[in-house]
Image (cartoon, grey):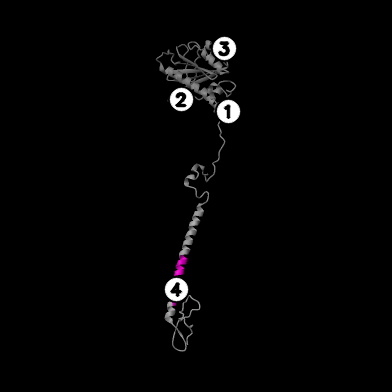
């Protein structure tokens, strides 16, 4: 008994076609499966699945690769990120991580006060003044040379006969001298007296000094203490100068009464050194008062 249709060959079983019949072997009242055919059909199905999985995997890889590439391009399509290096701002234009350094308004210190202004006139030169203040101590050291100090003298009478020769006294009084101070020093038989005339203004001091005749307008030597009488009748060396409102004079000679000649360098040296020291002391007086005014 045939279950196939007349005139058509029996259909073969195709696992991929619905309604297809599996081949069964003949024999017996019950049909048994053809295991060899089933195994072959299963292998065919597995091969087809592997082909589909491989093809699907390749398509997925292509899709993923495309997605990554699109992501990179998309990330680089921004206005700033895709700029070439040359278009970035130069270092000077990039803000500092610490921000802008604080700025301060420029300041300028006032110029220092001029010491000479404070010894140029009585109005500013107001510090206490005397021969002992201007020439302190009991001796004077200049470099390696030490001079013994004699005595000091002060007078308000600039024409006093015991302080100056008459011609110098007349000159000082004519230019309104207000005070005259003296001090003496000695070393190795050579002595010097320094006389300082004080005026109200620098102009008065300069005028008086400009009219001095060093041969006759002479300060009298001052003896006392370590300084013996000198230059009372002998030839001595004299100098004159002025600084600020002060005019200062020196007379130097031998303590034994010997006349001074141009070869006596020790006498010239002591006179020049004491004149220099007097200038420095007057200038220091100006410096001290300028410093006080600046700090006040």
Label 4 crowd (10 A; few <14 / some 14-19 / many >=20): few
Q: Disc 4 marks which residue?
A: 46
Mark 1 or mark 2, which has the lower sequence index?
Answer: 2
Q: Nearer the viewer, mark 2 or mark 3?
A: 3
Q: Secondary structure at mark 2?
A: strand
Q: Disc 3 marks which residue?
A: 174
Q: Which residues are magenta?
A: 41-57
Q: Residue at x 43, y 74 (%)?
A: 44
Q: Disc 2 marks which residue?
A: 141
C-alpha separation, residue under disc 2 versus residue under disc 3: 36 Å
Q: Disc 1 marks which residue?
A: 293
Mark 4 or mark 3, which has the lower sequence index?
Answer: 4
Q: Nearer the viewer, mark 1 or mark 2?
A: 1
Label 1 crowd (10 A; few <14 / some 14-19 / many >=20): few
Q: Nearer the viewer, mark 1 or mark 3?
A: 1
Rendered view: 210 above or below 93: above
Q: Residue at x 44, y 69 (%)?
A: 51
Which percent across, then down, holds residue 54? 45, 67
Q: Secondary structure at mark 3?
A: helix
Residue 193 visible in this rendered orientation of the protein: yes
C-alpha separation, residue under disc 1 versus residue under disc 2: 30 Å
Between 190 and 1, the one nearer to me in the picture = 1
Which percent across, then down, holds residue 6? 48, 83
């Amino acid at each position: 008994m045939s279950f196939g249709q007349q005139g058509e060959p029996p259909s073969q079983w195709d696992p991929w076609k619905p309604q297809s019949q599996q081949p069964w072997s003949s024999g017996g009242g019950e049909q048994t499966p053809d295991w060899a055919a089933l195994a072959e059909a299963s292998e065919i199905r597995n091969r087809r699945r592997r082909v589909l999985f491989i093809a699907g995997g390749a398509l997925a890889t292509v899709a993923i690769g495309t997605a990554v590439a699109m992501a990179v391009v998309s990330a680089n399509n921004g206005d700033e990120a895709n700029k070439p290096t040359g278009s970035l701002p130069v270092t000077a234009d990039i803000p500092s991580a610490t921000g802008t350094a604080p700025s301060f308004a420029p300041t300028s210190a006032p110029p220092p006060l001029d010491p000479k202004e404070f010894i140029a006139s009585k109005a500013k030169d107001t510090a206490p003044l005397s021969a002992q203040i201007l020439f302190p101590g009991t001796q004077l050291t200049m470099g390696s040379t030490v001079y013994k100090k004699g005595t000091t003298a002060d007078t308000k009478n600039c024409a006093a006969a015991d302080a100056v020769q008459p011609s110098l006294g007349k000159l000082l009084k004519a230019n309104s001298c207000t005070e005259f101070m003296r001090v003496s020093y000695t070393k190795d038989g050579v002595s010097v007296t320094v006389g300082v005339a004080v005026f109200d203004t620098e102009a008065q001091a300069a005028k008086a000094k400009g009219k001095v005749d060093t041969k006759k307008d002479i300060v009298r030597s001052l003896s006392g203490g370590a300084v013996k009488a000198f230059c009372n009748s002998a030839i001595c060396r004299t100098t004159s100068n002025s600084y600020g409102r002060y005019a200062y004079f020196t007379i130097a000679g031998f303590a034994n009464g010997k006349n001074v000649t141009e070869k006596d360098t020790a006498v010239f040296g002591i006179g020049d050194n004491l004149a220099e020291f007097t200038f420095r002391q007057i200038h220091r007086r100006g410096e001290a008062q300028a410093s006080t005014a600046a700090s006040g």
